Image (cartoon, rainbow, N blue to C red):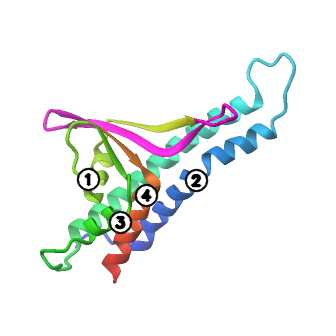
């Protein structure tokens, strides 16, 4: 008997990640606009909150991604549904959403399964940042992951919002 995997648990992780993809810039702007400025202070209240938030964000994204990908891979490996050989619900769901995977180094196949494998086995993981018009650096919803497979380096960028959307589409196709 395999581990019991609930579709809702996978979708829950996807939704949390989607929400965080859309909120980093707004959250940091709100914190910046409400900070108190102290004369002679070396570190501002905003800088302290920004540092704390970025640490929390990296931890939260990493943990949710690992849980999401691990559960999804278990689901894929234990799914006994027989599909038409010419049809792949995973491929349909992945191709339905654009600009999920960008290969920076190496050869990585574009699929939900491969993205999950790379996230699980990454030796390096970082949130990508952008600088807003007001100068605040925020997470743009993407990650860069890298590692080694068969003695060959790989490095990828995954836009997590469409990645999570593709996973939800995939779950919908599996449950139909």
Number of the label disc, if any, that sits on residue 167: none
Classify mark 4: residues with Cα within 10 Å, few (<14), some (14-19) or many (20+). Answer: many
Q: Which residue is mark 4?
A: 162
Residue at x-position 33% and y-position 67%: 93
Disc 2 versus disc 4: distance between alpha carbons? 12 Å
Q: Which residue is mark 3?
A: 96
Q: From where the camera sits, is residue 5 visible?
A: no
Q: Main secondary structure of the magenta part?
A: strand
Are the two marked residues, 2 and 4, in contact with CB atoms closer than 8 angstroms?
A: no
Are the two marked residues, 3 and 2, in contact with CB atoms closer than 8 angstroms?
A: no
Earlier-in-chain disc, 2 versus 4: 2
- In depth, the one of 5 and 175 nearer the eye is 175
Q: Which residue is mark 1?
A: 110
- Seen in the picture, residue 21 relative to 145 is either above or below; the reply is below
Q: Which residues are magenta?
A: 131-154
Residue 162 at x, y percent in the picture: 43, 58
Disc 3 versus disc 4: distance between alpha carbons? 9 Å
Question: Helix, strand or loop at disc 2?
Answer: loop
Residue at x-position 31% and y-position 77%: 174
Number of the label disc, if any, that sits on residue 22: 2
């Amino acid at each position: 008997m395999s581990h019991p995997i609930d579709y809702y648990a996978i979708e829950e992780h996807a939704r949390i990640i989607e929400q965080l993809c859309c909120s980093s810039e707004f959250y940091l702007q709100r914190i910046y606009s409400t900070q108190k400025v102290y004369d002679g202070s070396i570190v501002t209240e905003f800088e302290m909150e920004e540092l704390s938030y970025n640490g929390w964000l990296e931890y939260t994204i990493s943990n949710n991604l690992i849980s999401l990908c691990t559960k999804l891979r278990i689901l894929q490996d234990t799914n006994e549904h027989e599909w038409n050989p010419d049809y792949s619900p995973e491929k349909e769901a992945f191709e339905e959403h654009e600009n999920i995977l960008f290969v920076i180094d190496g050869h990585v196949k574009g699929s939900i399964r491969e993205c999950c494998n790379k996230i699980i086995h990454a030796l390096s993981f970082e949130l990508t940042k952008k600088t807003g018009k007001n100068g605040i650096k925020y997470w743009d919803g993407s990650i860069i992951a890298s590692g080694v497979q068969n003695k060959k380096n790989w490095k990828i960028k995954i836009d997590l919002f469409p990645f999570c959307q593709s996973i939800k589409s995939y779950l919908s196709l599996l449950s139909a």
